[in-house]
Image (cartoon, rainbow, N blue to C red):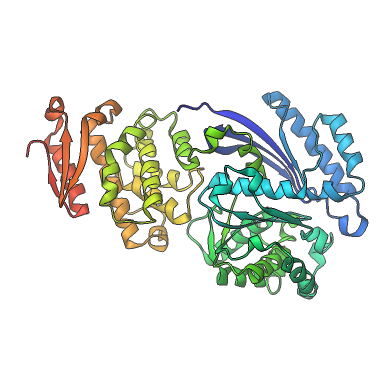
Amino acid sequence: MEHKTRQLAVIDIGSNSVRLVIYDVFGAHFTSVYNEKILAGLGRDLRETGRLSEKGKHMCREALLRFSHILTARGLSAPLVGATAALRVAEDAPDFVATILAETGFDISPISGEDEARYAALGLLASNDRRVGIGADLGGASLELMRLEPSLKTNAERVQGVSLPLGPFDAMGGNLSELTSADYAARLPDLDAALAKTPSYLDNEDVLYLVGGAWRNLAMVHQQRTQYPLRTLQGYRLSAETAQGLAHWARTDGIDELLNWPGMRKARAETLPYAGLMLERLIQRFAPKHVVISMAGLREGLVWNTLPKAVKNRDALIDGCRDFARGFVQAEHFGPPLYRFLSPLLSVLPQSFGEDIDARLLQAACHLAGLGKNLHPDHRAELVFEDVLYVPVSGLSHEARVFLSLSLFRSYTAKRQPPVSGLVDVLLTETQHHTAACIGEAIRLGIVVTGRTPSLLSDFELEIKGQTLHLNSDIARRDMVTKQVEYRLAKLAKLLGLTPVTPAN
Protein backbone atom coordinates (compact mmCIF):
# COMPACT_ATOMS: atom_id res chain seq x y z
CA MET A 1 0.00 0.00 0.00
CA GLU A 2 1.62 3.27 -1.12
CA HIS A 3 1.28 6.50 0.82
CA LYS A 4 1.91 10.11 -0.07
CA THR A 5 3.33 12.59 2.38
CA ARG A 6 0.92 15.19 3.74
CA GLN A 7 1.32 17.86 6.40
CA LEU A 8 -0.60 18.59 9.57
CA ALA A 9 -0.10 21.43 12.03
CA VAL A 10 -0.65 21.29 15.77
CA ILE A 11 -0.86 24.22 18.17
CA ASP A 12 -0.25 23.14 21.75
CA ILE A 13 -1.16 25.72 24.40
CA GLY A 14 0.03 24.56 27.77
CA SER A 15 0.34 26.27 31.11
CA ASN A 16 4.02 26.96 30.51
CA SER A 17 4.63 26.77 26.75
CA VAL A 18 2.89 27.66 23.50
CA ARG A 19 4.09 25.60 20.58
CA LEU A 20 3.53 25.20 16.85
CA VAL A 21 4.60 21.89 15.33
CA ILE A 22 4.20 20.99 11.66
CA TYR A 23 4.37 17.29 10.87
CA ASP A 24 5.08 15.36 7.70
CA VAL A 25 2.75 12.35 7.78
CA PHE A 26 3.67 9.23 5.81
CA GLY A 27 1.49 6.22 6.53
CA ALA A 28 1.53 5.64 10.30
CA HIS A 29 4.77 7.59 10.64
CA PHE A 30 4.92 11.30 11.31
CA THR A 31 7.85 13.51 12.13
CA SER A 32 8.10 17.20 12.91
CA VAL A 33 9.53 19.37 10.15
CA TYR A 34 9.02 22.63 12.01
CA ASN A 35 8.84 23.21 15.75
CA GLU A 36 8.55 26.63 17.39
CA LYS A 37 8.09 27.11 21.12
CA ILE A 38 7.44 30.11 23.36
CA LEU A 39 7.72 29.72 27.14
CA ALA A 40 4.86 32.09 27.89
CA GLY A 41 3.99 30.87 31.39
CA LEU A 42 0.28 31.34 30.76
CA GLY A 43 -0.65 29.51 33.97
CA ARG A 44 2.09 30.96 36.17
CA ASP A 45 -0.29 33.04 38.34
CA LEU A 46 -3.12 30.53 38.69
CA ARG A 47 -2.31 29.51 42.26
CA GLU A 48 -2.29 33.10 43.50
CA THR A 49 -4.93 34.81 41.34
CA GLY A 50 -7.00 32.15 39.61
CA ARG A 51 -6.38 34.06 36.39
CA LEU A 52 -4.04 33.76 33.43
CA SER A 53 -0.73 35.58 33.63
CA GLU A 54 -1.01 38.98 31.91
CA LYS A 55 2.50 38.68 30.56
CA GLY A 56 1.70 35.11 29.49
CA LYS A 57 -1.44 36.24 27.63
CA HIS A 58 0.55 38.88 25.78
CA MET A 59 3.25 36.41 24.76
CA CYS A 60 0.68 33.76 23.81
CA ARG A 61 -1.29 36.24 21.69
CA GLU A 62 1.89 37.37 19.89
CA ALA A 63 2.87 33.77 19.21
CA LEU A 64 -0.55 32.82 17.85
CA LEU A 65 -0.68 35.85 15.56
CA ARG A 66 2.71 34.84 14.19
CA PHE A 67 1.62 31.21 13.81
CA SER A 68 -1.47 32.29 11.86
CA HIS A 69 0.73 33.95 9.23
CA ILE A 70 2.96 30.89 8.92
CA LEU A 71 0.08 28.45 8.60
CA THR A 72 -1.89 30.56 6.13
CA ALA A 73 1.18 30.87 3.91
CA ARG A 74 1.66 27.10 4.07
CA GLY A 75 -1.98 26.35 3.33
CA LEU A 76 -2.44 24.84 6.80
CA SER A 77 -4.92 27.34 8.19
CA ALA A 78 -6.96 24.73 10.13
CA PRO A 79 -4.48 23.37 12.70
CA LEU A 80 -5.26 20.82 15.36
CA VAL A 81 -5.37 22.57 18.74
CA GLY A 82 -4.61 21.15 22.14
CA ALA A 83 -5.26 23.77 24.82
CA THR A 84 -4.90 22.36 28.30
CA ALA A 85 -5.08 23.04 32.04
CA ALA A 86 -4.55 26.80 32.29
CA LEU A 87 -7.37 27.52 29.86
CA ARG A 88 -9.59 24.97 31.59
CA VAL A 89 -9.46 26.55 35.02
CA ALA A 90 -8.59 30.27 34.73
CA GLU A 91 -11.60 32.51 35.33
CA ASP A 92 -10.60 34.85 32.49
CA ALA A 93 -9.94 32.03 30.02
CA PRO A 94 -13.27 32.35 28.11
CA ASP A 95 -12.56 36.01 27.29
CA PHE A 96 -9.05 35.17 26.13
CA VAL A 97 -10.33 32.31 23.96
CA ALA A 98 -12.83 34.69 22.32
CA THR A 99 -10.13 37.30 21.70
CA ILE A 100 -7.85 34.80 20.00
CA LEU A 101 -10.69 33.45 17.85
CA ALA A 102 -11.51 36.96 16.64
CA GLU A 103 -7.90 37.88 15.91
CA THR A 104 -6.53 34.66 14.40
CA GLY A 105 -9.45 32.39 13.60
CA PHE A 106 -7.97 29.75 15.94
CA ASP A 107 -10.44 28.12 18.32
CA ILE A 108 -8.30 27.52 21.40
CA SER A 109 -11.14 26.23 23.57
CA PRO A 110 -9.53 23.83 26.05
CA ILE A 111 -9.90 20.07 25.87
CA SER A 112 -11.01 18.25 29.01
CA GLY A 113 -8.54 16.72 31.42
CA GLU A 114 -9.76 13.26 30.43
CA ASP A 115 -9.20 14.04 26.74
CA GLU A 116 -5.76 15.41 27.50
CA ALA A 117 -4.84 12.12 29.19
CA ARG A 118 -6.37 10.15 26.32
CA TYR A 119 -4.48 12.03 23.61
CA ALA A 120 -1.24 11.75 25.56
CA ALA A 121 -1.76 7.99 25.79
CA LEU A 122 -2.51 7.75 22.08
CA GLY A 123 0.66 9.73 21.33
CA LEU A 124 2.73 7.31 23.38
CA LEU A 125 1.15 4.31 21.69
CA ALA A 126 1.32 5.84 18.21
CA SER A 127 5.10 6.13 18.45
CA ASN A 128 5.47 2.57 19.73
CA ASP A 129 2.37 0.40 20.00
CA ARG A 130 4.28 -2.24 21.98
CA ARG A 131 4.48 -0.02 25.04
CA VAL A 132 2.95 -1.37 28.22
CA GLY A 133 3.01 0.60 31.46
CA ILE A 134 1.98 3.93 32.95
CA GLY A 135 2.27 7.22 31.08
CA ALA A 136 2.79 10.46 32.98
CA ASP A 137 2.55 13.85 31.22
CA LEU A 138 3.70 16.78 33.35
CA GLY A 139 2.60 20.25 32.26
CA GLY A 140 2.73 23.60 33.97
CA ALA A 141 -0.59 23.24 35.81
CA SER A 142 -1.54 19.58 35.55
CA LEU A 143 -0.30 16.01 35.58
CA GLU A 144 -1.96 13.41 33.37
CA LEU A 145 -1.62 9.74 34.25
CA MET A 146 -2.73 7.01 31.88
CA ARG A 147 -2.54 3.25 31.50
CA LEU A 148 -0.83 2.02 28.35
CA GLU A 149 -1.32 -1.27 26.58
CA PRO A 150 -1.22 -2.07 22.85
CA SER A 151 -4.85 -3.18 22.67
CA LEU A 152 -5.93 0.35 23.60
CA LYS A 153 -4.32 1.86 20.51
CA THR A 154 -7.14 0.92 18.19
CA ASN A 155 -9.83 1.35 20.83
CA ALA A 156 -9.42 4.99 21.75
CA GLU A 157 -12.58 5.09 23.78
CA ARG A 158 -11.09 2.53 26.17
CA VAL A 159 -7.96 4.53 27.01
CA GLN A 160 -7.95 5.00 30.76
CA GLY A 161 -6.46 8.14 32.23
CA VAL A 162 -6.87 10.89 34.78
CA SER A 163 -5.84 14.56 34.97
CA LEU A 164 -4.66 15.95 38.30
CA PRO A 165 -3.94 19.60 39.28
CA LEU A 166 -0.34 18.76 40.14
CA GLY A 167 1.76 20.85 37.76
CA PRO A 168 4.40 23.13 39.28
CA PHE A 169 2.40 26.35 38.87
CA ASP A 170 -0.61 24.81 40.58
CA ALA A 171 1.28 22.93 43.29
CA MET A 172 4.02 25.46 44.05
CA GLY A 173 3.03 28.82 42.56
CA GLY A 174 4.69 31.04 39.97
CA ASN A 175 7.97 32.03 41.67
CA LEU A 176 9.69 28.70 41.13
CA SER A 177 13.21 30.13 40.94
CA GLU A 178 12.94 31.33 44.56
CA LEU A 179 12.02 27.96 46.08
CA THR A 180 14.35 25.93 48.30
CA SER A 181 14.66 22.23 49.02
CA ALA A 182 12.66 22.86 52.19
CA ASP A 183 9.81 24.31 50.14
CA TYR A 184 9.68 21.18 48.02
CA ALA A 185 9.93 18.90 51.04
CA ALA A 186 6.95 20.68 52.58
CA ARG A 187 4.79 19.57 49.65
CA LEU A 188 5.54 15.87 50.06
CA PRO A 189 2.49 15.00 52.24
CA ASP A 190 0.01 16.74 49.94
CA LEU A 191 1.47 15.21 46.77
CA ASP A 192 1.56 11.74 48.29
CA ALA A 193 -2.03 12.12 49.46
CA ALA A 194 -3.17 13.17 45.99
CA LEU A 195 -1.32 10.31 44.28
CA ALA A 196 -2.68 7.80 46.78
CA LYS A 197 -6.16 8.47 45.38
CA THR A 198 -5.25 7.61 41.79
CA PRO A 199 -7.28 4.80 40.16
CA SER A 200 -6.26 1.20 40.76
CA TYR A 201 -5.93 0.53 37.02
CA LEU A 202 -2.63 2.43 37.19
CA ASP A 203 -1.10 -0.03 39.64
CA ASN A 204 1.29 -2.92 39.06
CA GLU A 205 3.11 -1.78 35.90
CA ASP A 206 6.85 -2.21 35.34
CA VAL A 207 7.54 0.87 33.19
CA LEU A 208 6.78 4.54 33.79
CA TYR A 209 6.86 6.64 30.57
CA LEU A 210 7.57 10.33 31.11
CA VAL A 211 6.20 13.04 28.79
CA GLY A 212 6.83 16.76 29.08
CA GLY A 213 9.59 19.30 28.59
CA ALA A 214 10.66 19.43 32.25
CA TRP A 215 11.31 15.69 32.41
CA ARG A 216 13.04 15.70 29.02
CA ASN A 217 15.38 18.43 30.17
CA LEU A 218 16.04 16.67 33.45
CA ALA A 219 16.96 13.55 31.45
CA MET A 220 19.24 15.65 29.24
CA VAL A 221 21.01 16.90 32.35
CA HIS A 222 21.47 13.31 33.50
CA GLN A 223 22.95 12.30 30.15
CA GLN A 224 25.47 15.12 30.35
CA ARG A 225 26.38 14.50 33.98
CA THR A 226 26.96 10.79 33.33
CA GLN A 227 28.56 11.26 29.87
CA TYR A 228 26.01 8.90 28.35
CA PRO A 229 27.22 8.15 24.79
CA LEU A 230 23.92 8.41 22.84
CA ARG A 231 22.59 11.97 23.01
CA THR A 232 18.99 11.42 22.08
CA LEU A 233 16.16 11.55 24.59
CA GLN A 234 13.50 9.44 22.87
CA GLY A 235 13.54 6.05 24.55
CA TYR A 236 16.11 7.02 27.19
CA ARG A 237 15.71 4.39 29.90
CA LEU A 238 16.74 4.56 33.54
CA SER A 239 16.39 2.00 36.28
CA ALA A 240 13.97 3.05 38.99
CA GLU A 241 16.88 3.32 41.45
CA THR A 242 18.85 5.62 39.13
CA ALA A 243 15.78 7.73 38.34
CA GLN A 244 15.00 8.03 42.05
CA GLY A 245 18.51 9.28 42.72
CA LEU A 246 18.28 11.84 39.92
CA ALA A 247 14.86 13.00 41.10
CA HIS A 248 15.97 13.46 44.71
CA TRP A 249 19.11 15.35 43.64
CA ALA A 250 17.03 17.66 41.44
CA ARG A 251 14.87 18.86 44.31
CA THR A 252 17.65 19.01 46.94
CA ASP A 253 21.38 19.40 46.30
CA GLY A 254 20.96 20.02 42.57
CA ILE A 255 18.60 23.02 42.68
CA ASP A 256 21.23 25.72 42.21
CA GLU A 257 23.06 23.73 39.54
CA LEU A 258 19.84 23.22 37.59
CA LEU A 259 18.83 26.89 37.82
CA ASN A 260 22.18 27.80 36.28
CA TRP A 261 22.55 24.95 33.81
CA PRO A 262 24.50 26.16 30.74
CA GLY A 263 22.37 26.84 27.70
CA MET A 264 19.02 26.26 29.43
CA ARG A 265 16.48 29.06 29.63
CA LYS A 266 15.49 30.17 33.11
CA ALA A 267 11.77 29.63 32.38
CA ARG A 268 12.54 25.95 31.74
CA ALA A 269 15.29 25.43 34.31
CA GLU A 270 13.12 26.59 37.20
CA THR A 271 10.59 23.79 36.53
CA LEU A 272 13.18 21.01 36.86
CA PRO A 273 13.36 20.76 40.67
CA TYR A 274 9.60 20.23 40.76
CA ALA A 275 9.92 17.69 37.94
CA GLY A 276 12.35 15.85 40.19
CA LEU A 277 9.97 16.08 43.13
CA MET A 278 7.06 14.69 41.11
CA LEU A 279 9.16 11.91 39.57
CA GLU A 280 10.34 10.91 43.04
CA ARG A 281 6.76 10.67 44.31
CA LEU A 282 5.55 8.74 41.24
CA ILE A 283 8.29 6.17 41.71
CA GLN A 284 7.38 5.93 45.38
CA ARG A 285 3.68 5.53 44.54
CA PHE A 286 3.81 3.11 41.60
CA ALA A 287 7.14 1.28 42.15
CA PRO A 288 8.05 0.82 38.46
CA LYS A 289 11.20 -1.08 37.54
CA HIS A 290 12.22 1.38 34.83
CA VAL A 291 11.55 4.95 33.76
CA VAL A 292 11.57 5.83 30.03
CA ILE A 293 11.57 9.27 28.40
CA SER A 294 9.14 9.83 25.52
CA MET A 295 9.23 12.67 23.02
CA ALA A 296 5.69 11.80 21.97
CA GLY A 297 2.56 12.81 23.83
CA LEU A 298 -0.48 15.05 23.41
CA ARG A 299 0.52 16.57 20.05
CA GLU A 300 1.30 13.21 18.50
CA GLY A 301 -1.94 11.81 19.87
CA LEU A 302 -3.88 14.58 18.15
CA VAL A 303 -2.17 13.75 14.83
CA TRP A 304 -2.59 9.99 15.20
CA ASN A 305 -6.28 10.44 15.98
CA THR A 306 -6.81 11.88 12.47
CA LEU A 307 -5.40 8.83 10.66
CA PRO A 308 -7.70 6.35 8.90
CA LYS A 309 -8.24 3.11 10.81
CA ALA A 310 -6.31 1.03 8.26
CA VAL A 311 -3.31 3.34 8.59
CA LYS A 312 -3.42 3.28 12.39
CA ASN A 313 -2.84 -0.48 12.26
CA ARG A 314 0.39 -0.09 10.29
CA ASP A 315 3.85 -0.30 11.90
CA ALA A 316 5.14 3.25 12.38
CA LEU A 317 8.75 2.05 12.52
CA ILE A 318 8.60 0.44 9.09
CA ASP A 319 6.71 3.38 7.56
CA GLY A 320 9.31 5.68 9.09
CA CYS A 321 12.18 3.75 7.51
CA ARG A 322 10.36 3.75 4.17
CA ASP A 323 9.87 7.49 4.46
CA PHE A 324 13.55 8.06 5.28
CA ALA A 325 14.61 5.94 2.29
CA ARG A 326 12.39 7.81 -0.16
CA GLY A 327 14.45 9.77 -2.67
CA PHE A 328 17.39 7.38 -2.41
CA VAL A 329 17.09 5.53 -5.73
CA GLN A 330 19.28 2.70 -4.43
CA ALA A 331 17.10 2.12 -1.39
CA GLU A 332 13.52 3.13 -2.08
CA HIS A 333 12.21 -0.04 -3.77
CA PHE A 334 14.81 -2.51 -2.57
CA GLY A 335 13.59 -3.01 0.99
CA PRO A 336 10.51 -5.28 0.65
CA PRO A 337 12.06 -7.84 -1.74
CA LEU A 338 15.31 -7.78 0.26
CA TYR A 339 13.39 -8.59 3.45
CA ARG A 340 11.61 -11.47 1.71
CA PHE A 341 15.00 -12.78 0.56
CA LEU A 342 16.62 -12.50 4.01
CA SER A 343 13.71 -13.45 6.26
CA PRO A 344 14.60 -17.21 6.28
CA LEU A 345 17.68 -16.20 8.29
CA LEU A 346 15.50 -15.25 11.27
CA SER A 347 15.39 -18.91 12.27
CA VAL A 348 19.20 -19.06 12.67
CA LEU A 349 20.19 -15.52 13.64
CA PRO A 350 21.18 -15.31 17.32
CA GLN A 351 18.19 -13.75 19.08
CA SER A 352 18.91 -10.19 20.21
CA PHE A 353 15.68 -8.54 21.42
CA GLY A 354 13.03 -11.21 21.05
CA GLU A 355 11.48 -12.86 18.01
CA ASP A 356 9.03 -10.09 17.09
CA ILE A 357 11.46 -7.19 17.59
CA ASP A 358 14.26 -9.00 15.75
CA ALA A 359 12.01 -9.44 12.71
CA ARG A 360 11.03 -5.75 12.76
CA LEU A 361 14.67 -4.67 13.02
CA LEU A 362 15.67 -6.88 10.09
CA GLN A 363 12.81 -5.42 8.06
CA ALA A 364 13.82 -1.88 9.07
CA ALA A 365 17.43 -2.57 8.07
CA CYS A 366 16.29 -3.82 4.67
CA HIS A 367 14.35 -0.62 4.02
CA LEU A 368 17.42 1.44 4.91
CA ALA A 369 19.87 -0.62 2.84
CA GLY A 370 21.53 1.56 0.24
CA LEU A 371 21.25 4.89 2.04
CA GLY A 372 24.95 5.56 1.60
CA LYS A 373 25.31 5.09 -2.12
CA ASN A 374 25.32 8.87 -2.70
CA LEU A 375 28.01 9.45 -0.05
CA HIS A 376 31.79 9.51 -0.40
CA PRO A 377 32.94 5.86 -0.49
CA ASP A 378 35.81 6.45 1.96
CA HIS A 379 33.40 7.67 4.65
CA ARG A 380 30.17 5.97 3.64
CA ALA A 381 30.00 3.42 6.45
CA GLU A 382 30.59 5.99 9.19
CA LEU A 383 28.12 8.50 7.74
CA VAL A 384 25.42 5.85 7.39
CA PHE A 385 26.01 4.75 10.99
CA GLU A 386 25.42 8.26 12.29
CA ASP A 387 22.46 8.90 9.97
CA VAL A 388 20.65 5.77 11.15
CA LEU A 389 21.65 6.40 14.78
CA TYR A 390 19.61 9.61 14.79
CA VAL A 391 17.02 8.76 12.13
CA PRO A 392 13.67 10.33 13.16
CA VAL A 393 11.69 7.10 13.48
CA SER A 394 9.75 5.77 16.44
CA GLY A 395 9.50 2.39 18.07
CA LEU A 396 13.19 1.96 18.91
CA SER A 397 14.87 1.59 22.28
CA HIS A 398 18.37 3.04 22.49
CA GLU A 399 19.80 -0.48 22.25
CA ALA A 400 17.71 -1.28 19.17
CA ARG A 401 18.69 2.04 17.57
CA VAL A 402 22.40 1.28 17.99
CA PHE A 403 21.83 -2.28 16.75
CA LEU A 404 20.11 -1.01 13.59
CA SER A 405 22.93 1.49 12.99
CA LEU A 406 25.57 -1.18 13.45
CA SER A 407 23.74 -3.55 11.07
CA LEU A 408 23.82 -0.92 8.30
CA PHE A 409 27.42 -0.04 9.15
CA ARG A 410 28.42 -3.71 8.76
CA SER A 411 26.72 -3.83 5.37
CA TYR A 412 29.60 -1.60 4.20
CA THR A 413 32.56 -2.79 6.26
CA ALA A 414 33.36 -5.83 8.39
CA LYS A 415 36.64 -4.52 9.78
CA ARG A 416 36.41 -0.85 10.75
CA GLN A 417 35.09 0.29 14.10
CA PRO A 418 31.92 2.41 14.42
CA PRO A 419 32.59 6.15 14.71
CA VAL A 420 31.01 6.90 18.12
CA SER A 421 33.58 5.78 20.65
CA GLY A 422 32.33 3.26 23.20
CA LEU A 423 28.70 3.42 22.08
CA VAL A 424 28.41 -0.15 20.83
CA ASP A 425 30.22 -1.64 23.82
CA VAL A 426 28.10 0.31 26.31
CA LEU A 427 24.68 -0.46 24.83
CA LEU A 428 24.98 -3.81 23.01
CA THR A 429 25.82 -7.30 24.19
CA GLU A 430 28.32 -9.47 22.34
CA THR A 431 25.41 -11.46 20.91
CA GLN A 432 23.72 -8.32 19.59
CA HIS A 433 27.02 -7.15 18.12
CA HIS A 434 27.42 -10.49 16.34
CA THR A 435 23.84 -10.55 15.05
CA ALA A 436 24.25 -7.04 13.63
CA ALA A 437 27.35 -8.27 11.79
CA CYS A 438 25.32 -11.16 10.37
CA ILE A 439 22.60 -8.82 9.13
CA GLY A 440 25.16 -6.51 7.57
CA GLU A 441 26.79 -9.41 5.73
CA ALA A 442 23.39 -10.73 4.64
CA ILE A 443 22.49 -7.33 3.16
CA ARG A 444 25.79 -7.32 1.26
CA LEU A 445 24.97 -10.76 -0.10
CA GLY A 446 21.56 -9.58 -1.34
CA ILE A 447 23.17 -6.58 -3.02
CA VAL A 448 25.96 -8.57 -4.68
CA VAL A 449 23.65 -11.34 -5.90
CA THR A 450 21.34 -8.93 -7.71
CA GLY A 451 23.42 -5.85 -8.45
CA ARG A 452 20.95 -4.03 -6.20
CA THR A 453 18.13 -4.79 -8.66
CA PRO A 454 14.81 -5.36 -6.82
CA SER A 455 13.16 -7.45 -9.54
CA LEU A 456 16.00 -10.01 -9.52
CA LEU A 457 15.56 -10.84 -5.82
CA SER A 458 12.42 -12.87 -6.61
CA ASP A 459 14.60 -15.29 -8.61
CA PHE A 460 16.79 -16.13 -5.60
CA GLU A 461 16.07 -17.76 -2.26
CA LEU A 462 17.94 -18.45 0.94
CA GLU A 463 17.11 -21.76 2.62
CA ILE A 464 18.29 -23.34 5.84
CA LYS A 465 18.67 -27.13 5.80
CA GLY A 466 20.13 -28.51 8.98
CA GLN A 467 23.63 -27.05 9.23
CA THR A 468 23.73 -25.74 5.66
CA LEU A 469 22.85 -22.40 4.12
CA HIS A 470 21.58 -22.79 0.56
CA LEU A 471 21.42 -20.09 -2.08
CA ASN A 472 18.78 -21.30 -4.51
CA SER A 473 18.13 -19.62 -7.84
CA ASP A 474 15.87 -19.76 -10.85
CA ILE A 475 17.62 -21.89 -13.46
CA ALA A 476 17.73 -18.91 -15.81
CA ARG A 477 19.79 -16.99 -13.23
CA ARG A 478 22.47 -19.62 -12.52
CA ASP A 479 25.03 -17.60 -14.50
CA MET A 480 24.70 -14.82 -11.93
CA VAL A 481 26.14 -17.00 -9.15
CA THR A 482 29.77 -16.00 -9.62
CA LYS A 483 32.83 -16.47 -7.39
CA GLN A 484 32.07 -13.11 -5.76
CA VAL A 485 28.56 -14.29 -4.87
CA GLU A 486 29.96 -17.57 -3.51
CA TYR A 487 32.47 -15.57 -1.45
CA ARG A 488 29.71 -13.46 0.11
CA LEU A 489 27.57 -16.51 0.83
CA ALA A 490 30.54 -18.21 2.49
CA LYS A 491 31.23 -15.19 4.71
CA LEU A 492 27.61 -15.09 5.86
CA ALA A 493 27.52 -18.84 6.44
CA LYS A 494 30.70 -18.66 8.54
CA LEU A 495 29.18 -15.99 10.78
CA LEU A 496 26.11 -18.18 11.24
CA GLY A 497 28.12 -21.37 11.84
CA LEU A 498 26.72 -23.00 8.70
CA THR A 499 28.09 -24.57 5.53
CA PRO A 500 27.36 -22.67 2.29
CA VAL A 501 25.69 -24.41 -0.65
CA THR A 502 25.19 -22.72 -4.06
CA PRO A 503 23.20 -23.93 -7.09
CA ALA A 504 26.44 -25.13 -8.70
CA ASN A 505 27.02 -27.50 -5.76
Q: Is residue 231 above or below residue 441?
A: below
For the point 51% across and 38% down, the residue is: 313
The location of residue 136, given as percent across then percent down, is 66, 57
Whether residue 382 is visible: no
Whether residue 388 is visible: yes
The location of residue 113, given as percent across then percent down, is 76, 50
Q: Give the position of the C terminus as an image quadrant.
A: top left
Q: Is residue 427 above or below residue 281?
A: above
For the point 41% across and 63% down, the residue is: 426
For the point 18% across and 43% down, the residue is: 489
The location of residue 336, given as percent across then percent down, is 35, 34
The location of residue 196, given as percent across then percent down, is 72, 69
Callout count: 0
Foreground pick, 379 / 114: 114
Q: Is residue 421 above or below residue 95?
A: below
Q: Give the position of the N terminus as an image quadrant.
A: top left
Foreground pick, 127 / 258: 127
Instruction: Name the image quarter holding residue 484.
Output: top left
For the point 56% across and 53% down, the residue is: 149
Is 302 placed left or right of 174 in the picture?
Answer: left
